[in-house]
Each structure stands twice: as C-alpha cells, then as structure tokens.
Image (cartoon, grey):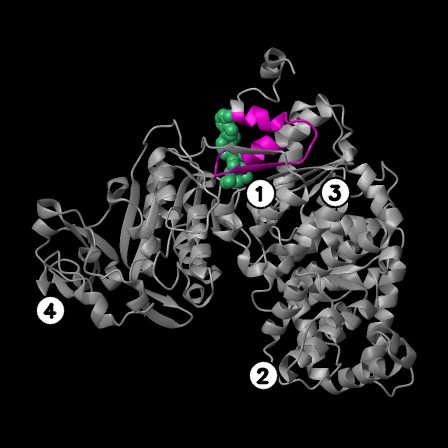
Amino acid sequence: MNTQTTMQDPLLAGLNNKQLEAVTLPQQSALILAGAGSGKTRVLTARIAWLIQTEQVSPTGLLAVTFTNKAAKEMLTRITASLPINTRGMWVGTFHGLCNRLLRAHHREAGLPASFQILDIADQLSMIKRLMKLMNVDDEKFPPKQVQNYINGCKDEGLRAHAVDAYDPHSQKLREIFEEYDKQCQRDGVADFAELLLRCYELLERDTNIRQHYQSRFRYILVDEFQDTNRLQYQWLKLLAGKDNCMFAVGDDDQSIYGFRGARVGNMRDFETDFNVQSIVKLEENYRSHSNILDAANAIISHNKNRLGKNLWTSAGAGEPVRVYQAYNDNDEAQFIVDEIKMLHAEGTELGEMAMLYRSNAQSRVLEHALFSANLPYRVYGGLRFFERAEIKHALAYMRLIANANDDTALLRVINFPARGIGARSLEQLQEAARAGNCSLWQAAINKVGNGKVGGKGIDGFVALIRQMVDEAYGISLAELAELATTLSGLKAHYQNEKEGEDRIANLEELVTAAVAFTNQDFGNHSNADGETEQDLLTQFLSHASLEAGEHQADVGREALQLMTVHASKGLEFKVVFISGLEEGLCPHEQSTYEANGLEEERRLMYVAVTRARQRLYLSHAQSRMLHGQVRYGIPSRFLDEIPDKLLKHLNSKPVAKSGYGRDYNELPAVMSKQQSSTQKNAMPWKVGQQVAHNKFGNGVVVSYEGNANDMRVQVNFGREGLKWLALEFAKLTAI
Ligand SMILES: Nc1ncnc2c1ncn2[C@@H]1O[C@H](COP(=O)(O)OP(=O)(O)OP(=O)(O)O)[C@@H](O)[C@H]1O
Ligand SMILES: [Mg+2]
C-alpha cells in the first residue's frame, strides 16, 4: 500500500496510524478492541469504503451489522458521500433487519408465508396472554411477562421447545406454553423478533444451497458493537462466515450492557479462536471527550474486575469539570436540568446537541413534564413510539389483515374496534371454532358467515368489511391503502366522536404521510438488483413499522432535546449530557444486586452514559423521588464516589456525608428512611425540607442550596409563588 496516496484519500484522511492499520488490514478476520469514542464505528465505515474502492470488493459482497437502523443509514450516507456507488443492494442493517430480509427472499424454504408479519413485543405479550387463557394457565403462577422472557431467552440461546430441559412441573408447563405459542405463530403466519433470527439460523444450517450461496456472496462480514452479540447471533455470524470469509468485528468489552438479554462478552474470546484471528488492533486515543470526562469514565470502569484491559487517553485537554448537582427531589432535579438547558441554549448550544439520559424509562415522565412546562421541544428516543401508539396499531392491524387475514393477533385487535357489537361470548365461540377446526380465526369466521350461529351479524359485518378492503386495495398505492385502513375501517369516524380525539386523528393522518415517505424513499430493502424477490410494498411497510418503530422520531430535525435510556444511547455522542437519577437502587439498579455480575454490568452502563458526552457532563441525584407511585429516599450512587474529586464541581454545597455514608454498600439499604436522609444535611443554616416564611413570598419549603460561606443561596418552594433562589445573606427567612 502506498501510504502517501492513502493519506490523501478522503476516505482515510485524518485517521491515526492505528485506525489506518485497522482499516487497511489484509483480508483475514480481525478484532478491533477499543474503548468508547476511539473511532471504532468510523473505522468500520472506512473499512467498507476501502474494501470497495481499493480492494475492488463489490458493494453487494459485503454484509455489515450495526446496532440500530439509524446507525445503518448513517453508515450508508457516509459511504455514498465519499464513493460514487449505489448502496441500494447493500446488506447493511441490524441483525433483525438482515434476517427479515433473508427470510423474505426464502420464505418458502423457511416455512413462512410470503407476507409473514412481525410480532412486536406488545403483540407478542397479548398473544401469550390469550394462549394462556385458552390453556387455563394460572397467570399468577406464570406471569405472562416472565413467560415472554422465558420464550425469548430460549430462542436467543438457539433453543426450540423440544430442546429445552424441563424436569419439574413448573418448567414443564413453561415449555408447553412455549410449544403452543410457536404453533400459534406458525398458524397465524407471524414471527416475533427472536424468531426472525432463530428461523434464519435454522434455514442456513439446514439448507446447504442457501448457506453456500450466501457464504460465497458475503466474503466480508463487519460487525459493530460486537460485545453485545448473544449466543445465537454469534452462531449466525459463524454460519454465514463459513471457513473462508473474513470477519471484521469491532467492540468494547467495557460497554457490554445487554448481558441481561443474553449478550456474551465471551464471544470476543471465542471469536479469536473460532476465526483464527491474526490481528487484534487496539485503539487507545479517544476523539470524543475532554479528559475530565474521560478520566471520570476510566475511574469508574477501573472498579470492574472482569475486563480485557485497555487504556484510553485524549489529547483534547482537560476541558470543563464534571458538574454534580444534588437535588431536593425529582422535580427539583428536572427543574435544574431545564434551567441549565435554557441557559446553554441561550448561549448558542443547539437543543439537538444536548441529551438527557436515565437508567429506567419510568424516570422520563418528570423530565418530560418539566420540558413541556418550559416549552422546550424534546424527543423521547426509544420511548412510546409512533408505531406503538394505540390508534396506529389499530390502523396497522387493518393493513395487516389486508395482507394476510389469517393473522389472529391483528384480527383480535380490531374485530370489535370500532365497536360493532361483537361481544366476549361471540369471540369465545369463534376461538373455540378455530381451535376445533385447527384453523385461523378468519377461517373460522368465514366458515360461519351467514349461519347466524357464531357471533351473529357483527361477525358477518366484519368479514364483509375486510373483504371489501381487500377488493378496494387491489392496485392502489400504499398511501391510499393507509387511507383506506383509517377511513373504511371506521377508525377516523370513531375518534372524531371521541373527546380529545384530535391527536389520534392527526396521528392517523401522519400514518398516510409515513406511507408516502416510505414509498418515495429508498429503504434499501425493496431492491431486486441482485435477483432477490421483490417484496410487496405493503408487507415491507408493515415490517418497517415493526422493526424501525421509533428510530425516526429522534431523527427528524435536530432542533429538539434528546431523551433516552442509557441503553438506547449506545454509540451516540452529544455536546452536553445530563445523567439524572444517580441514586443507589436506581443506578445501580436494585435488581443488579441480586444477579451475578449484575453490579459490573451496571457499572458498564454508567461508563457508556458518561462517555456519550463531548464537552460538558452533568450528574445529578435527588434526595427523594416519586417512582411507581411511591416516595423513595435515595442516597447518592456509589458511582459518584468512584470519580476522583478533582474532576468534579459540586454545584450546590457538597453532601457532608461523603465519608459519613459509611460506604459499605452491602450494609446500606437501597431505599433510606426519611429520617436518615435528612440527618445528612447540616452544612447550612436551613435544612432541606424546613418550612420557612418570607415577608414577600409568604410560606415555603427549603428545597436546595448552593455555594458556600458568604455567597450561599437557598432555593425555596413558595407554592403558588413558585420556586425562588434567594441569597441567604439578604433573604431574611424565618423558621415556622
Ligand atoms: N482520527 C480521528 N480524528 C478526528 N476525529 C475522529 C477520529 N476518529 C474518530 N473521530 C471522531 O470521534 C468520535 C467518536 O468516533 P466513533 O463514534 O467512531 O467512536 P466509537 O469507538 O465507535 O465510539 P462508541 O464506543 O461510543 O461506539 C466521532 O465524532 C468521530 O468522528
Ligand atoms: Mg461506535
């Protein structure tokens, strides 16, 4: 390779030596093991471009697995920006997306109908509940959510019901539900997320022709976020790679945060031997964060024992200290964050450059409320997403029935929505008839149409409606079809009569817009440039709705704050990051103390969160918080203590109890009593929680304080007068 020309190549420009080495490695399997922000994703993208441009690899001869669809799109955009190629036929996507694509092309061999639908998590749960009812299974002994985790867990391990060990009655029952569930999915022609992968794996394993076809096609397989692959994903990659193909895996063991879903860091070690890895490249320069942030992250993660070990440094300079805020309660914490955001925004930081991260979804409600009240636009990334909203799911169910009327889940969702007089009794009869005839509900319904016995007129009307929809759908565009599903179904009319139904109608209209966008956009999947079967657009759109739900939300326009769980923030970066709720019991999560390695995984999660920040990082915790309808009194997270004090700036007076907490976490309860919590605060004249009177604002409660000695300020909640910051010296507060 000629280094001179390579360095001038825009694809490779700016890469450091180690990165360059990784990008231009010879054709063999390699592992790039590197810390956060060291350019792993950038290297992977550059490697793809380099293979195409320099090594003359056909774009369709590569397969790249990314963590989100968003990342896949970004990667394709970057490649097209530097190379004049058509990326339509390229296989870049998530495990689920790629498996879906492969199964569509070979649905017959995989034993699936051409228009098989994807069952999302919520639909899967409702199917399990329905099935358990039919099987008379006690849902107290077998909580459906646990059954769902069990089924998905087995599939992630590559196991079908018959292969699961079950020696006691409880496990035997679980296995039986699993078996029935799979049969039901097969009857309905649907596949859940885990099924996509397992089905695809089984297909490749069983069908030598198909396997060899893809093995000889994908000579290069590239995987981002390799540390989070589970056993089945790893086996799937192994099958595809065969003996001769080159696998290029990039990952960071310190960012493995999906252990609870079966991800195995051990895959990294296995990979070295299974793939005869000759080169392990370590990247140690971080380009994302200033050193105060990076040092904080390094200090936290150094408390983990189970590490492969690497150093991470930056030449970016110390930058700003990491800011720590102790809030009185969750509202105060949210208000603090909002105030800081307003200030930063006024100073010129774009809203889209700022992110609020939290450990659990439930924490977002208070933050959202504060943002809403402050009129700040925000987007919840990975929260309740457009395609998951009830009215959208209803409309999609009609569309699914148009594609495949045997889809029981879709049918049950809308058979009586909007209401058409089909009662529980009629539905039960229909379900019994379906079971007796071993057929779908739709089949049972059409067999009975007109005989007046089962379900009566209501069901007849529904059958006629779906038939009419199918007739009218013939030959029309996807957008017209979406329109049909929202109007002919009666959904729009239904919401028109509902109080506050405007939002729902607006969402239904948005669905038509989404269909137009989908038709116009190149989603990569519906190309048949390389001989794949053309999927029909409706089926593609429905798969898209299940697979990509929500990822758009964060994409549209940059001018909104980004809210997300730490899990969802993986791979992303922001100029300013707020991590809230840093309390024992929340982060680390209570659950983690019961599980082996649970605490280490929580620490990796904290490491991921901290390393998302480029310039400024805020860490906050609250003395009390309302969660799941209960007030909790928390103590600061141990992770705060793991950061050297010299990197921190305490925005209000530092908690006195730095040493006083004892710091023997094994002895500390996750939730403290109110008594304990308030005795920790004695560094200022007013205790947090003290009732005080002010001659202008009236009575209030001290919620927080900051500064020290002469310039201490106290924050008081004066009820109707609102929250006020007052300089203690002048405030003239009296205790009441
Ligand atoms: N050689 C380089 N020169 C300048 N900037 C770089 C270089 N390499 C990477 N970067 C930038 O550093 C940031 C982090 O890169 P990237 O997202 O690829 O890291 P990563 O290792 O994938 O991080 P994570 O572990 O969080 O996924 C990006 O903004 C990227 O553009
Ligand atoms: Mg990355």
Spatial distance from mark 3 to mark 2, Cα to Cα?
A: 43 Å
How packed mark 4 is, by other alpha carbons closer than 10 Å (few <14, some 14-19, many 20 or more), is few
Q: In what element is the residue under mark 4?
A: loop
Asked if the residue under mark 4 is in contact with the one under mark 1, i.e. CB atoms within 8 Å, the reply is no
> What range of the chain is rendered magenta?
18-44
Helix, strand or loop under label 3: helix
Using the rendered image of the protein, determine whether residue 5 is visible from the camera's viewpoint: yes
Task: Specify whether residue 376 is in view.
Answer: no
380 or 533, which is in the foreground?
533
Q: CA distance from mark 3 to mark 4?
A: 74 Å
Disc number lying in front (1 or 4): 1
Q: State left or right for residue 189 relative to residue 661.
A: right
State which tag comes first along the sequence, 1 or 4: 1
Is the residue 85 above or below the residue 219 in the image?
Answer: above
Residue linked to disc 3: 241
Of callouts 1 and 3, the N-terminal one: 3
Q: Residues within 10 Å of mark 3 (few under 14, many from 20)?
A: many
What amino acid type should be assigned to the residue bearing mark 3? Ala
Q: Which residue is mark 4?
A: 736
Question: Where the N terminus falls, by quadrant?
Answer: top right
CB under 8 Å between callouts 3 and 2? no
Q: At which x and y percent is residue 127?
A: 70, 72
| Residue type indicated by callout 2 | Lys
Q: Are marks 1 and 3 in contact (CB under 8 Å)?
A: no
Front: mark 1 or 3:
3
Identify the residue position indicated by label 1 in the image.
Answer: 555
